[in-house]
Image: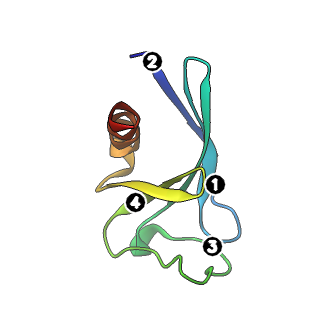
Amino acid sequence: MSEVTLNLNSRPDGYGFLYGDVWRGDEHHRVNVLPPAGRWAGDLKLEDYEPHATDWVVYMDGEEVARAKERDGLLAVIQQHLLEG
């Protein structure tokens, strides 16, 4: 498997999501990450996108694909998703 690179904005958008890109070789995906409730820092919450109590929720190309307990675990859960896909 090619190396996976995750690039996220350091600050959330107005809806509280961190957003960016994932690359695996020439394969590219848009990624949005919704921080857990205690770390959420948006201005407005989108309907049907409530922060989870403890999990970082990963959306890739608009679909929820993974969850991580810690921000440092995001790359690992994304890599696992790409391996399974």
Mark 3 nearby-residue class (10 Å; few <14, some 14–19, many ≥20): some
Type of amino acid at the residue the image marks with label 2: Glu
Between the C-alphas of marks 3 and 1, the distance is 10 Å
- Callout in the foreground (4, 2): 2
Residue 56 is labelled as 4
- The C terminus lies in which quarter of the figure? top left
Q: Would residue 12 appear left or right of 76 to someone viewing this image? A: right
Q: Is residue 27 above or below residue 19?
A: above
**Residue bearing mark 3:** 42
Mark 3 and mark 1 residues within 8 Å of each other at the beta carbon: no
**Residue bearing mark 1:** 11
Residue 70 is situated, as x and y percent measured from the top left of the image, at: 32, 52
- Callout in the foreground (3, 2): 2
**Residue 47 sits in quarter:** bottom right
**Residue 72 sits in quarter:** top left
Between the C-alphas of marks 4 and 3, the distance is 14 Å
Which of marks 2 and 3 precedes in the sequence? Answer: 2
Mark 1 nearby-residue class (10 Å; few <14, some 14–19, many ≥20): few
Which of marks 1 and 3 precedes in the sequence? Answer: 1
- Callout in the foreground (1, 4): 4
Which of marks 1 and 2 precedes in the sequence? Answer: 2
Which of marks 2 and 4 precedes in the sequence? Answer: 2
The residue positioned 52% from the left and 58% from the top of the image is 63
**Residue bearing mark 2:** 3
